[in-house]
Amino acid sequence: MKILVIEDEKELARDIVKYLSEEDYRCETASDFATAKEKVSLYQYDCILLDLMLPGGDGFDILEHLRSQNKQDGVIIISAKNTLEDKIKGLNIGADDYLAKPFHHSELAARIHSVIRRKQFDPSNLIIQNEIKIDLLSKTVHIGNIAILLTKKEYDLLLFFIGNKNRVLSKSALAEHLSGDLADMFDSHDFVYAHVKNLKKKLSEAGYGNYLKTMYGTGYKWEL
Amino acid sequence: MIKLLDKPFKAFTIYAMVILLVSIPLYFLVVDWIWVTEIDDNHEIIMERIENRFEQAHVSGHDLETILHTWNTLQPSSSIMAISENITRQDSIYEVTKYNEYEGEWDRFRGLQTVIQIDKKPYLLNIETNVEEAYETIFAIGLVTVVLYGILVFGFIQLNRKISKSVWDPFESTLNKLKSFDLSMSKEVSFEPTDIEEFDALNRTISKLISENVSAYNQQKAFVANASHELQTPIALLKSKLDMLFQDEKLSSEQSELVNAIQIPLARLTRVNKNLLLLARIDNSKFSDISEIDFAEKVEKSEELLQDYIVEKQLDFHKKALGKCVFLCSKFLAETVVNNLLSNAIRHTSKNGEVSVEWDETGFSFKNSGNEALNQDLLFKRFSISTTETTNSGLGLAIVKEICKQNGWDINYNFLDHFHIFSVRFGKF
């Protein structure tokens, strides 16, 4: 999987690359408008992370350029300009997702995972990991032949874990994933514990291996 | 409070009264003096004429006595009496009061007593003229004065009204403009031109003051916006670095707890910064996504997002629709209002408490149980401290208030029956 990180803040780009390269992603970076435009024109990526404010130009122009060339690379806008107008504009021009800075890397990884999956044109839209089988269209989860009934939040969490396998996920990152922007209004995110516990219980009752680990005092990890 | 014009008016009235009161005795003295001098002069003339005419008539002896007798009987105002030759009398002027039998009142008389020569014999001539009584004169003058005073005061009042209407017009218009002026609405104020020097100076001074204030306010706004904008990148980096650190397998559990502990203030910093940016954007009214908002739908959405927190605190949450609540607003702002008010209510309710939302055609309200009323004055101010909770960015309600202001809604806080109530009422659209 090839990913292009278009981000002028080099430190941030480096962190993103580092976080993502532990999956089977190959990352390239572009830190200004010209480089970004060149790379986008020359190569094909599975997913492009696009910062809107770039030295030398506007990120929207890159997106427009890409779509005018009929390229179907997945694009996630990562921007500090957290305005609804930008979000709508970006999605209208053809971005697949919009993530406001600052974000947790785990959230970004989950979004990339989801965008790439959607772009893969797999008609069955199935995620299979060891014994588990997730149908993204009907939003059903099977282990072997046993169907597992998950709540919407448990299902969201499961996808989040799978998109961040072998990473330590903090409670606040999970809470932010579930409640969005509103999570940082609250001190306690204990409800995350309840959801994870229920998910774990349902999975193990269906005979799934113990992949979901609780890291004491820090968070959770989906270990494969 | 009294009106500015009434102040000199009162002084003028009192001054006029004093002068007019003093003028009454003064008028009287002058009038009386003229009156008496004129009578005395007249008496002198009459005396000379009588003397001359008797001399020219050449009457004497018996005839003279008959004439004098007739004179004294018929002439009411003068008498001529024979006196012995050796008596020499000087002219004397006197004043007497006599009882008038016909009118039944006392009359004042001015008299002249002198000696005249008729047929070489001395006669005592006495001429008296009725003078107006002092009290009558005073009464008449007093009456005229009072009437004049009345007219004067009436005139003052009328003039005062007329003047205050026309002269103070530019002042009133300036005052009205100032009353409706709101610094945060960033609208320039222009005053109507006036030909009165003082008001013109006032208008110019106020205009200058306002434009200075507006520019200071705008600078401050721009500063906050720029500062929070500049903070975004370092915050993003900080979050990124913490995430990276968190993945380090060599991290001991103590260290990862420390990293977790850093996440909390970082989240707060993020929130404050986001809210500051949002406030700056609301102030600049840069929202174009206006559409019809169904309040019930937004509450539903917000409830779904906050469900976990409601369950965690075991709150009794209910919604009550008393009517359809649909209004025009930016979708984003409407969601912000609902999210902020609901999360505010949830955050400030203790475990097992009660939170409810009510709405109808005219507005909506959020209620949550609590123990004591909050300080109304500080509640909607930025960064005011109404609780000791640390997650509170101190801006949630300020944002709600700002959004309400933008849309012309009224937001109020009440504390009733152990419930905090935040209610938003739509004005007229």
Image (cartoon, rainbow, N blue to C red):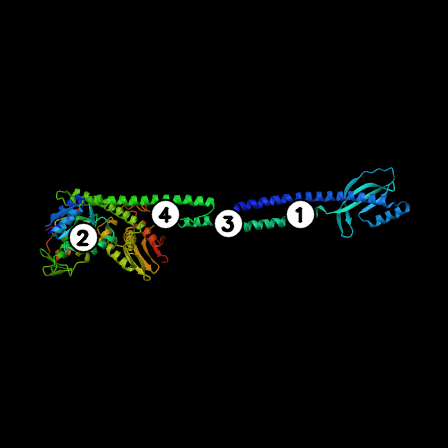
- SS at mark 4 in the image: helix
Q: Can residue B111 be seen in this view?
A: no
Q: Which of the chains bears the disc numbered 2?
A: A
**Left or right, B347 with reference to A141:** right
Say the numbered circle drawn on residue B141: 1
As measured in the structure, the alpha-carbon distance from the residue carrying label 3 to the one carrying label 2 is 67 Å
* Vertical placement of residue B169 versus A144, above or below: above
- Amino acid at circle 4: Leu
Tell me: B143 left or right of B256: right
* First in sequence: mark 3 vs mark 1: 1
Residue B115: x and y, percent? 83, 40
Q: The C terminus of chain B lies in which quarter of the figure? A: bottom left
Q: Which of marks 3 and 1 is in front?
A: 3
Front in this rendered view, residue B61 or B96: B61
* Label 3 Cα crowd, 10 Å radius (few <14 / some 14-19 / many 20+): some
Which label belongs to residue A63? Answer: 2
Residue A134: assigned label: none
Q: Distance between the residues labelled 3 and 1?
A: 34 Å
- Check if mark 2's residue and mark 4's residue have beta carbons within 8 Å: no
The lab-note entry on whether marks 3 and 2 share a chain reads no
Q: Do labels 3 and 4 share a chain?
A: yes
Question: Which numbered tag is attached to residue B183?
Answer: 4
Disc 2 to disc 1: CB gap under 8 Å? no
Mark number displayed over residue B164 = 3
Q: Looking at the picture, how far across and down is residue A60, in whole percent?
A: 20, 51
Pick whichever of labels 4 and 1 is earlier in the sequence.
1
Q: 10 Å neighbourhood of mark 2: few (<14), some, or many (≥20)?
A: many
Which chain does the numbered disc 4 sit on?
B
- Do the residues at pointers 3 and 1 share their chain? yes
Q: Position of residue A35 (x, y in %)?
A: 15, 47
Q: Select label 2 or label 4 by which is in front.
A: 2
Real-space CA distance between mark 2 and mark 1, rounded to the nearest whole angstrom: 101 Å
